[in-house]
Amino acid sequence: MSRPKIDDDEIWLDPNESPGYLIRDTNLAVGKALRRNLSNYGMTLGQYYFMRALWIEEGLSQRELSRRVGTTEPTTASVLRLLEKNGLVRRVRNRRDRRTINIFPTQKGRNLKNELLHMAIDINEIATSSLSAEEVETLKRLMRVMKTNLDQDEGNTGT
């Protein structure tokens, strides 16, 4: 694909013309709304992502939890310590592989599931309130395509 030459005196910096910037800007706005609401529960956005992964599938290993949330294992360990201290998760040594620790939400952690997921749904509904159902589906489809394109191109970008 041929790219236009960018001259030093040309302005190509309008962020409203960059899909990546618009996605980032929207992500920041969604994150801000989530953080504001999560603060009422004494929970950070990072902690919420771990709890959401555990609500989907309990008993994940720390390594698998890191992969699903997209964090490093040291970050995961740090967040899990806080979640455990707050009584939201418990760690259980795996019976078959004693080196593996599986993570489970406690009853207190499970009790937050419906309320926090509904809160996140409400934020998504606010964000998409002026879009039709068809536009929301198109938006999701296009964002999945963009992610797939970037995943497939991983390591190939650059000069």
Image: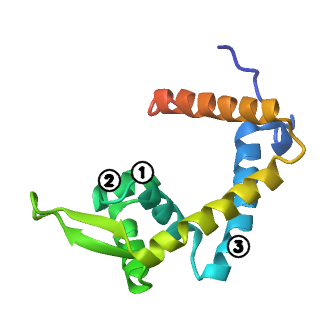
Q: Which residue is pictured at 61% across the width and 80% down the height?
A: 41
Return the residue nearer the eye: 157 or 33.
33
Name the amino acid type tagged 3. Answer: Asn
The x, y position of residue 146, in whole percent, is 62, 31
Q: CA distance from mark 3 to mark 1?
A: 23 Å
Q: Which residue is pictured at 80% across the width and 35% down the height?
A: 133
Which disc is residue 154 wearing?
none
Q: Which residue is pictured at 38% across the width and 66% down the height?
A: 76
| Residue designated by label 3 | 37
Q: Is residue 31 above or below residue 129?
A: below
Q: Earlier in the sequence, mark 3 or mark 1?
A: 3
Return the residue nearer the eye: 27 or 80.
80
Horizontal relation, residue 28 to residue 154: left or right: right
Query: Callout 2: 10 Å neighbours few (<14), some, many (20+)?
Result: some
| Residue designated by label 1 | 68
Q: Is residue 152 above or below residue 106?
A: above
Name the amino acid type tagged 1. Answer: Arg
